[in-house]
Amino acid sequence: MIIAESPVATSTKSASMVVSAYRGGVEVIARWADDWRDLCVESVDEQPFYHPEWIAAHIRAFTPKANVLLLMGTCDGRLHMALPLLEERALFYGLPVGRLRAPVNGHTCRFDAVRRPGPQGDLALQALWEYLKSLPTWDLVEVSYMPIGGTLSALALAAEADGFQTAQLPMSPNPYVPIPPDLQSLCQLRGIRNTLAKKGQLKLRRVGAANSASLQRFYELESAGWKGVEGTAIAYTEQGPQFYNEISKWAESLGCLCMYTLELDDQILAAHFGLSYRGRYFSPKVAYNENFKPWAPGHLIVEEILRDCAARQLHECDITGQNDEWKAKWTSRTRPQCTQYIFRKGISGSIAHALGFRLRPRILRLRNSVMSKSGASQVH
């Protein structure tokens, strides 16, 4: 149920900027979805992962009972910044803390606040920090899958300037491929293509409709490979298909869904669950047929997708996810990301910072030193 017409816990005014907090379940996001969506289109870094539909689908699937805290910066009734967080009690290296964290996991791709560019956006960011530091309910803020240099990086800098302790844990950077203007430069797999041509017709298909048959084929292909063996495939939980089914319908309504399959006659060699959005192609999930591993199906489909992106005049392929070894074949360009922490001033925040970023690194160095010496003694 939406938190009525007066969901504001408290507000803080900075010049003409008002920051308000809305608490409740996932319905809080629906309350502001229209304004949030409009803000996304004009934001500093516009990506599909920051839209209210993506965030709401994630919460519904993976944390349906979460306590949502939505911070909104407005001026004259116009939204200038939006930051959704989850409020919870948690253990941080054994210490009970109040934590505000981003609604993310391995399916998220990346996460950042949405902010309008220019002076008004800067004012909204500073006002939101002023409001956030006044909230008594948290000891630490934790944001994973955060692009370094984005809006939440700026929020962390504002916290540092205020004397708050912050820390970053690097995550594997996100690789991306600028779409080459010369398609001949993509002809890297001629030998494999010639071999497969003797076995059948190679064809790339792109589906923009969120039909259950296409989604099910993708889930089955992913489950049949190493992700199925490790138990990380989408279909291995109820939450996975729920999330991807929902965002595929949203992406279809937006006209950006791209379900790619590379087929050899009637056999699927590889598939991408992708999004084409504002000149960029994103690939949140990929899968390939391991029976065709000697013919590099994962690379073949990337080459075909890059050709299709060039034909549609897209300028970038954002592979998302970790900077895995296979992606280095296509690009050396990456964007850094991290898990960002902000620790509240006070006993709990200070202890949490010490546990995570002073004591723990020393313990790990000591353990590694002991193990190294133990290994050396065994050799001699």
Image (spheres, rainbow, N blue to C red):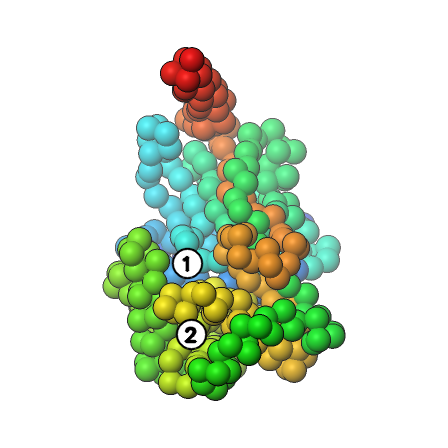
Q: Secondary structure beneath disc 2?
A: strand
User: What amino acid is labelled 2 in the image?
Assistant: Leu
Q: Looking at the rendering, which quadrant does residue 98 occupy?
A: top left
In the rendered image, residue 256, in percent from the top left (x then y), is placed at: 52, 77
| Residue placed under numbered mark 2 in the picture | 269
Q: Position of residue 173 (x, y in %)?
A: 57, 49
Q: Please name which of the two marks, 2 or 1, marks the residue nearer to the observer.
A: 2
Split into 4 quadrants, where in the image is the N terminus? bottom left
Q: Can residue 163 be seen here? A: yes
| Residue 334 locus on image (x, y percent) | 63, 53
Indicate whether 161 appears above or below 151.
Answer: above
What quarter of the picture does the C terminus occupy?
A: top left
User: What residue do we see at 65% from left, 33% from top?
Assistant: 161
Q: Name the residue nearer the viewer: 286 or 340.
A: 286
Number of labels in the image equals: 2
Residue that mark 1 sits on: 107
- Residue at 58% x, 63% y: name it: 318
Q: Nearer the viewer, residue 280 or 125?
A: 280
